[in-house]
């Protein structure tokens, strides 16, 4: 089994959130207030930086307070965790439990990375995904295939449980310690993709901030131009809009195009 692809992880989250929107009781578009100009500017800057893999620019657009970085818990109570499994340094744990956001399904997946951070190697949460049905392209490990991977299953479950309990309790410092900070990992800027245009518009108030939908138009070397849709959550911190990177999501229209960056 191949390790989960970062591009598929982004695709998975956005597909899950998009599917969840269908049953939500959102007000009509016309009823939503316009996006504040500064929030729209920050959203565009973040998308440009992400597509260009500009980690310095990304970090400058993130909240400084950990409570703003993660936001209120999206679980009404502790979900049931099941099926921990590992594939090398990638791990996954299924969950089922009621969300606080009506747009989200009650089932999903915690994805973890085994990484060194702050001088300590441990399983850390890469992302939490809500979905009704996994896309066929999502190469999430379905089980631990080696004895070494099976030995990691208790640690995977414990890491996921510790993270979710901290979120329920508002323990943002603990969450930050248990999170894989992908935005702090240096990466070379891609030469094969270019953002040629992006539209953003408000969707709702969510996670104690603003949620926007975006439509990005990408030019990919050797391929047809791609239109990418997704969701971006922002929070106003000290009168300045910032982006929550953990809930940032891409969803492609048509076959997966690959992530503009390597997370």
Image (cartoon, grey):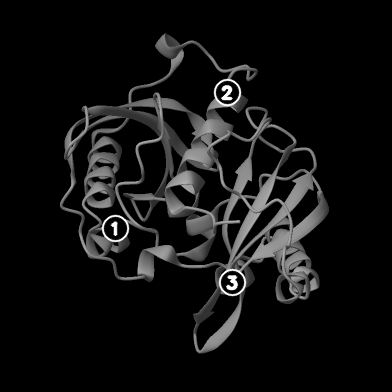
Report whether residue 193 is seen.
yes
The picture places residue 176, in percent across and down from the top left corner, at 55, 69
Left or right for 120, reference 110: left
Q: Earlier in the sequence, mark 2 or mark 1?
A: 2
| The quarter of the displayed image where residue 132 is located | top right
Rendered position, 105 above or below 153: above
Give the mark, 3 or 1, whose residue is nearer the N terminus: 1
- Residue position marked by numbered label 1 in the rendering: 58
Residue at left offset 25%, top offset 47%: 51
As rendered, which of 83 and 117 lies closer to the eye? 83
Q: Are marks 3 and 1 in contact (CB under 8 Å)?
A: no
- Eye-nearest disc, 3 or 1: 1
The image shows residue 239 at horizontal and vertical percentages of 33, 50
In the displayed structure, does residue 205 sit left or right of residue 240?
right
- Where disc 2 sits, the SS reads helix
| Quadrant in which the N terminus appears | bottom right
Marks 2/3: CA–CA distance: 30 Å
Label ID, residue 21: 2
Q: In the image, 231: left or right of 40?
A: right
Q: Are marks 2 and 1 in contact (CB under 8 Å)?
A: no
In the rendered image, the residue lying farthest to the bottom is 119
How many numbered callouts?
Answer: 3
Q: Which residue is mark 3?
A: 173
Q: Is residue 259 above or below residue 123?
A: above
């Amino acid at each position: 089994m191949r390790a989960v692809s970062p591009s598929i992880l982004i695709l998975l989250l956005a597909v899950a959130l998009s599917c969840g929107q269908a049953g939500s009781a959102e007000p009509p578009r016309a009823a939503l207030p316009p996006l504040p100009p500064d929030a729209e500017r920050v959203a565009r800057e973040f998308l440009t930086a992400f597509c260009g893999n500009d980690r310095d620019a990304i970090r400058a657009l993130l909240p400084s307070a950990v409570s703003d970085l993660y936001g209120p818990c999206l679980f009404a109570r502790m979900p049931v965790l099941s099926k921990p499994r590992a594939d090398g340094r990638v791990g996954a744990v299924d969950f089922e439990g009621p969300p606080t956001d009506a747009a989200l399904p009650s089932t999903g997946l915690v994805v973890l990375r085994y990484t060194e951070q702050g001088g300590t190697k441990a399983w850390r949460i890469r992302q939490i995904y809500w979905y009704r049905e996994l896309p066929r392209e999502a190469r999430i490990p379905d089980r631990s295939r080696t004895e070494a991977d099976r030995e990691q299953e208790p640690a995977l479950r414990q890491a996921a449980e510790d993270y979710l309990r901290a979120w329920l309790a508002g323990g943002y410092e603990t969450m930050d310690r248990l999170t894989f900070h992908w935005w702090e990992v240096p990466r070379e800027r891609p030469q094969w993709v270019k953002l040629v245009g992006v539209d953003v518009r408000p969707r709702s108030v969510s996670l104690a901030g603003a949620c926007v939908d975006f439509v990005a138009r990408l030019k990919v070397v050797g391929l047809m131009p791609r239109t990418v849709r997704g969701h971006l959550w922002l929070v106003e911190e000290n009168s300045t809009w910032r982006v929550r990177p953990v809930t940032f999501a891409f969803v492609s229209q048509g076959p997966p195009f690959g992530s503009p960056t390597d997370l």
